[in-house]
Each structure stands twice: as C-alpha cells, then as structure tokens.
Image: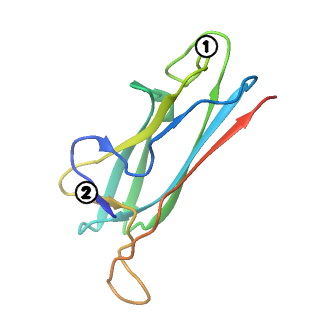
Amino acid sequence: AGQEGTTTYTDLTGSTIAYTPPAGTKTVIYEFQFQHSRSGDSFQMGHFKFFIDSDEVTKAYITHGCEDVLDLVTFKWPIRIGGTADTTSGRVASWSSNKTLKMQFRDYGSSNETKCHRTSYTDGTGTDTFVMPRIGITALTT
C-alpha cells in the first residue's frame, strides 16, 4: 500500500531486507526503487536515511522533493566489506551473518507532506495509483 509521510522518521515500507552475502564477497550493493509524490501540498520534500542494522549510514542521507514532483527514486549504496568499519560510509569489517538493511523517511514539515509508493495522478486524472517498490541486492567478489 502507499505510505504517507509524517514529521517523524519511520521505516520505508518494502525497503527492509535481512541479508548474508556469500563467502568471499567484497562489496554488497543495496538498491531500492520507490515512487515519491506529493500528498496534498504543492511543494513537497522528504528526508531519507539508510541503515545497516541500527547504524545510520550518514553519508547516504538524501533529501528529495520540489514543487509538484512525482518521481521514481532509485537509491543505490555500496557496502564495502573488510578493513576498518566506518558506519558513516557503511563499510563493515566483516559480514558472516544476517544484517538488516533498510531506509527510513519523514516529511520536511507539516506544509511539505509526501507519500511513497503512490502517484498523485493517473491517466489524465487526479487519481492515485499504487507503484510497487523494488528492492535488490548485488554481491561482488572483486
């Protein structure tokens, strides 16, 4: 179903996956694609965060929106494995059991309301249509 934004961060539906990469993986690429639309306000803006388990990958933070924007957003983030862990960039020292990857979002404010997974217009009308989110994982050994 569609998801209305609020002024509090909430998990972005469809974005959560628990994953363990195959042995020898050097990089995991997380990809999440979703519809981001206005919800009543003409100037909408949303903030989006990416998490590995409970750690926010702060360098992955994005703000998306503008006047009447209706956009299919593709968020893609590489998670490097090995070396010194760095939660700001999402690097992990090792990865041999499930880690939960997800996104959270919120509205900029109560006058900049957004929604995800729904359009604001369909076939020349002001009717919403559900747009299924898409999630993907790619494991690279090089």
Position of 114 with respect to 19 (left or right) is: left
For disc 1, the marked residue is 93
Q: Residue at coordinates 44% horizontally, 42% vertically from top-left?
A: 16
Q: What is the three-letter code of the residue carrying label 2?
A: Asn
Q: Residue 76 or 65: which is nearer the viewer? A: 76
Residue 23 shows up from this direction: yes
For disc 2, the marked residue is 112
Q: Nearer the viewer, mark 1 or mark 2?
A: 1
Q: Residue at coordinates 19% horizontally, 57% vertically from top-left?
A: 111
Residue 49 image offset from top left, x and y in percent: 41, 38
Residue 117 image offset from top left, x and y in percent: 40, 63
The number of callouts visible is: 2
User: Marks 2 and 1: in contact by CB < 8 Å?
Assistant: no
Q: Residue at coordinates 40% horizontally, 43% vertically from top-left?
A: 48
Q: Residue 76 or 82: which is nearer the viewer? A: 82
Residue 86, relative to residue 4: is it above or below?
Answer: above
Residue 61 shows up from this direction: no
| Secondary structure state at the residue bearing disc 1 | loop
Q: What is the three-letter code of the residue carrying label 1?
A: Ala
Label 2: few (<14), some (14–19) or many (≥20) C-alpha neighbours in 10 Å: many
